[in-house]
Amino acid sequence: MDDAVTPEVRALLDKGGPLTIELHELLLELFPDAVLTADSENIGYGTTTGYKGLKFTVAPFTGYVRLGIAGGASLPDPAKLMQGTGKVHRHIKIRSVDELAAPALRDLLVAALR
């Protein structure tokens, strides 16, 4: 894990444990220039700080990690991974490291970065 993350980001990664850390590493692999932000519940991955540049959010919960995808409502999702009914954003509940290896997830994340 990157030692340059802020204490707020590190606290959420630690709270979420291995699954949250694996998701974090996957997002940074696909989005190496991500600007990381954090509040008490979410890690934000964006092109800048603030809402306008936001691409993803990661929020650890008991038993899963919620991956928010900004603009997800407009993305193709043939594997039906995304949940939510918002007009703009969607999320995915990730419950295992194996789910992170799914090609459909990677395709969705890459599409979100375009």
Image (cartoon, rainbow, N blue to C red):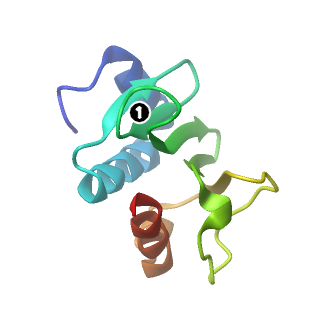
In the rendered image, residue 93, in percent from the top left (x then y), is placed at 64, 55
Q: Residue at x 50, y 35 (%)?
A: 52
Q: Residue at x 30, y 41 (%)?
A: 34
Front residue (pair 87, 108): 87
Q: Secondary structure at mark 1?
A: helix
Count of all numbered marks drawn on residues in the image: 1
Residue 83 visible at all: yes
Front residue (pair 71, 66): 71
Which residue has dot 1 on it?
13
The vertical placement of 13 against 58, above or below, is above
For the residue marked with disc 1, what is the amino acid?
Leu
In the rendered image, residue 104, in percent from the top left (x then y), is placed at 49, 78
Q: Residue at x 33, y 56 (%)?
A: 26
Image quadrant in which you'd find residue 85 = bottom right
Residue extending farthest bottom: 78
Image quadrant in which you'd find residue 35 = top left
Residue extending farthest left: 3
The vertical placement of 100 against 77, above or below, is above
In the rendered image, residue 75, in percent from the top left (x then y), is placed at 59, 69
